[in-house]
Image: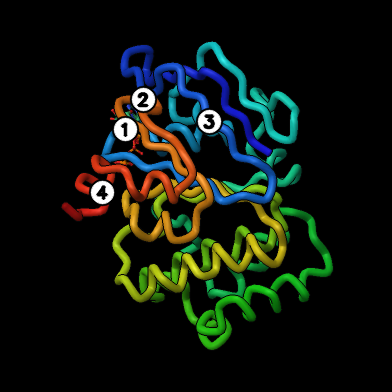
């Protein structure tokens, strides 16, 4: 579904954020990308959804293939129409609009006329959003805002979702709920996901395969059952001796 081949990314011509990074997200799978602050996880997702130019990040050599097509140079909103949706760090909902209008805006942006079934699906996945649909989104809790960001992605009926640290700043119970939804969307609709996380425990609970990155490079990869047993990962990411 997504292949990143040997990409280099430099910000403002000086900060080298990615150094020949490659990874593969197979169709129908959930892949997680783990790493500490500043490792380059967000940059990897931005490269894959072509957001870097807007932020003064340049992709050097290398290729990014989505469904087999080289997507470099395709505008991010065109990529959404082609099935690639990036749920960005910090959630980025419309804080001053109601919950429902956030979904309406997402469907308008896609020129989707008959979106009621899409809204119903979001309500079904996140009943709390349905209860709060007339509330101003900025007043939702952090977890509910993450659900709304996820719901906006669902409206686009994507084939691939890139998710940037969905667990960030959320209570464990809410994180569980978000990740249960990730699993459900994958199982029911076959949506492929690349999930960036620092919380390895929860990421491993849903992912099939994981990559660990440091300083702009992949330093380890494997099926999650294998990564879970690795001594370094256990002590560094899972906090077990
Ligand atoms: P975090 O978990 O803190 O978001 P990350 O693994 O997602 O970290 P990135 O945000 O991709 O890491 O950052 C990778 C490197 O690129 C860091 O050294 C960071 O300081 C730098 N960087 C990121 N964005 C920019 C930018 N817009 N301009 C300059 N440097 C940047």
Disc 4 crowd rating (10 Å Cα; few below 14, some 14-19, many 20+) is some
Q: Which residue is mark 1?
A: 39
Asked if the beta carbon under badge 2 is closer than 8 A to the nearest atom of ligand 1, the reply is yes
- Pick the residue in front: 140 or 33: 33
Asked if the beta carbon under badge 1 is closer than 8 A to the nearest atom of ligand 1, the reply is yes
Q: Earlier in the sequence, mark 1 or mark 2?
A: 1
Q: Earlier in the sequence, mark 2 or mark 3?
A: 3
- Pick the residue in front: 156 or 134: 156
Residue 216 bears which disc, if any? 2
Callout 2: helix, strand or loop? loop
Residue at point 54% right, 88% down?
Answer: 131
Q: Earlier in the sequence, mark 4 or mark 2?
A: 2
**Coordinates of residue 199 in the picture (x, y in percent):** 32, 54
Residue at point 43% right, 32% down?
Answer: 43
Residue 199, compared with residue 39, is above or below; it is below
**Coordinates of residue 56 in the picture (x, y in percent):** 43, 24
Residue 234 bears which disc, if any? 4
Distance Cα–Cα, label 4 vs label 3: 22 Å
Distance Cα–Cα, label 2 vs label 3: 12 Å
Q: Which residue is mark 3?
A: 23
């Amino acid at each position: 579904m997504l292949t990143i081949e040997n990409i280099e990314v430099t910000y403002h011509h000086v900060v080298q954020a990615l150094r020949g990074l490659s990874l593969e997200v197979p169709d129908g799978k959930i892949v997680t990308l783990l790493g500490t602050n500043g490792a380059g996880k967000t940059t990897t997702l931005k490269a894959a959804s072509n957001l870097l130019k807007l932020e003064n990040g340049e992709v050097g050599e290398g290729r990014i293939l989505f469904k087999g097509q080289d997507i470099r140079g395709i505008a991010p909103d065109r990529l959404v129409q082609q099935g690639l949706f990036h749920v960005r760090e910090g959630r980025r909902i419309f804080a001053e609009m109601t919950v429902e209008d956030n979904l309406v805006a997402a469907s308008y942006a896609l020129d989707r006329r008959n979106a009621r079934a899409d809204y119903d699906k979001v309500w079904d996945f996140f009943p709390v959003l349905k209860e709060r649909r007339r509330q101003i989104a900025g007043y939702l809790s952090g977890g509910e805002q993450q659900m709304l960001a996820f719901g906006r992605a669902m409206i686009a009926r994507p084939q691939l979702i890139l998710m940037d640290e969905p667990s960030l700043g959320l209570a464990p119970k809410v994180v569980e709920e978000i990740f249960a939804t990730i699993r459900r969307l994958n199982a029911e609709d076959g949506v492929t996901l690349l999930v960036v996380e620092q919380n390895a425990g929860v990421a491993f609970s849903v992912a099939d395969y994981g990559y660990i990155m440091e300083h702009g490079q992949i330093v380890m990869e494997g099926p999650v059952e294998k990564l879970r047993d690795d001594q370094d990962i256990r002590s560094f990411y899972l906090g077990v001796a």
